[in-house]
Amino acid sequence: MRQDMHHHCSSKITRRAFLENTALTSAAVAFGTDVTRSAPAAPSKPNILYLMTDQHRADCLGCAGNKVIKTPHLDSIAADGVRFSSAYSSTPSCTPARAAILTGLSPWHHGMIGYGRIAEQYPFELPGALRDAGYYLYGIGKMHWHPQRNLRGYHKILLDESGRAEAPGFVSDYRQWFKEQAPDLDPDATGIGWNDYRAKAYALPERLHPTKWTADRAVEFIEKYDRSEPFMLKVSFARPHSPYDPPQRFMDMYNQDDMPAPAVGDWAARYAPHEEPPNPSLWHGDLGVQQAKESRRAYYASVTFIDEQIGRILAALKNRGLYDNTLILMFADHGDMLGDHHLWRKTYAYESSAKIPMLLRWPKAMGMDQQRGKTLPQPVELRDVLPTFLDAALSTTEGRQTSDEGRATRDDSLIVHRPSSSRPSFLDGKSLLELVRGNTKNWRPFIDLEHSMCYNQDHWNALTDGKIKYIYYAFDGREELFDLTNDPSELRNLAADPAHSDMLLQWRQRMVEHLSERGEPFVRDGKLTIRKERLLYSPHFPKKPAAG
């Protein structure tokens, strides 16, 4: 038995066919009347603001209970919407996370079960579906797609590719802008790397930092937007992913001694050793509490820098009168270990790596005001982004949803349009708006996580409901079981505890059932198998389209 997953590739359904089959192609026409920059007319569909951070831990938000970090603007999104307290990235590294966002599918179904190059095209993708639904799409920041200038249905993208250059001569829009603004300066002058554990204040003027550039472009877009159709604006920050390089004024907001010490589980000793001197891009090693706190200070400062810039973006929406009719979804692609359990970077099943912040704020006309400010505990994942945006895009905001069971109800003689077909059946994800509406009965009981071999010889599969987590390491058959309710830092592995043997058997069987569709080499004779070979792509990964 698999939870909330549907076979998809055999259908070969396209986004255009989906819209036609649901009689919604009328959404592809422009909405509203002519607008001006000072007073844009509200389209009949909500605008969508898609805020993404890179390598952002779930616990690094004030609204998540962190008493040290300063995130007032992100907290304001949660206060005016909801926070999902069990949000995950199923394959917690950059490219497979982005595949989940693009496709609305599980790792096995979109085909990336580890870190590799993303497919050039999937049968059904978020940007094209929204474009066909009548949206104007604009993307800013880190895309991490292949090829790097692949528009994927966006009308325009402005790239900050964090120094990556797949093709000879490629220069990102940020780097081109930097060269024009500061021809005599080096954008990498701070001197720390893309996967570095070290920290240092940004060595150049703050206005040149990629975090500031990304927000500046977003504010410009909002201030100048004068089209009649609704927009989807993707703002994808390349931080707080290393380099941990915030401007000095943000470093000054934090005291290193106030930083939380790294969590170290009773199972983590295997990750403590490291070379001397430590490799700046190491993936494991006990570097001491003070180094972890030094890294965390700059990381927290980077998050606060992003928060300030998001505040500018929200202010721009409000100044244009667009905020009330904009759906805002904020999330990260994955977390950052920051020395927890002697681990660094990501790709691990642990909360610091796989758990992410996720905040949703919906337009005023959708109602459901009694839900604003709540924390929702159901397990959600990046595959839910596409269905959420489709739900909003294929609905109108001409009324209010007031029933806990999601029925359309009359409110001041207005009827909300709630198309039953707003979620294509082949998607693994579900609309987060369903949870806001109170439709929790059929939500998935747990979410699947996995990552193929990357830095080391461990490849793993995991399941969690946000309260219990089970992890299976296929290279050697190790198991881990954590009680996240009573042990949120995963300090004690319960897999060998006789008192929890029934729970272990229950979750192991759930894993067998989850992996059963894959057959060998994942499951044999109803049991989990030992797998020594690395498998990066599943059979569902799209083949390269034929030339011509």
Image (tube, grey):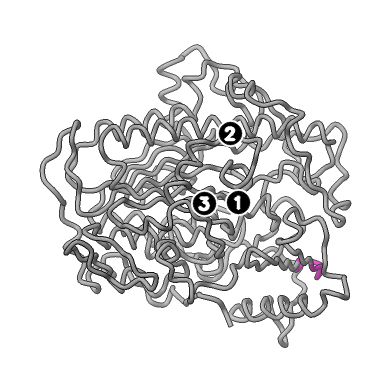
Residue 474 painted magenta: yes
Residue tagged 2: 70
**Quarter containing the C terminus:** bottom left
Quadrant in the picture for residue 250:
top right
Q: CA distance from mark 1 to mark 3?
A: 16 Å
Residue tagged 3: 358
223 over 75 or under it: above or below: above
**Quarter containing the N terminus:** bottom right
- Considering only order in the chain, which callout, 3 or 2, is on the residue closer to the N terminus? 2
Residue 88 in view here = no
Residue depth check, mark 2 versus mark 1: number of the one nearer the observer? 2
Residue at 27% from the left image edge and 54% from the top image edge: 365
Q: CA distance from mark 2 to mark 3?
A: 17 Å
Amino acid beneath label 1: Ser
**Residue stretch in magenta:** 473-479
Residues at circles 1 and 3 in contact by the CB criterion of under 8 Å = no
Residue 173 painted magenta: no
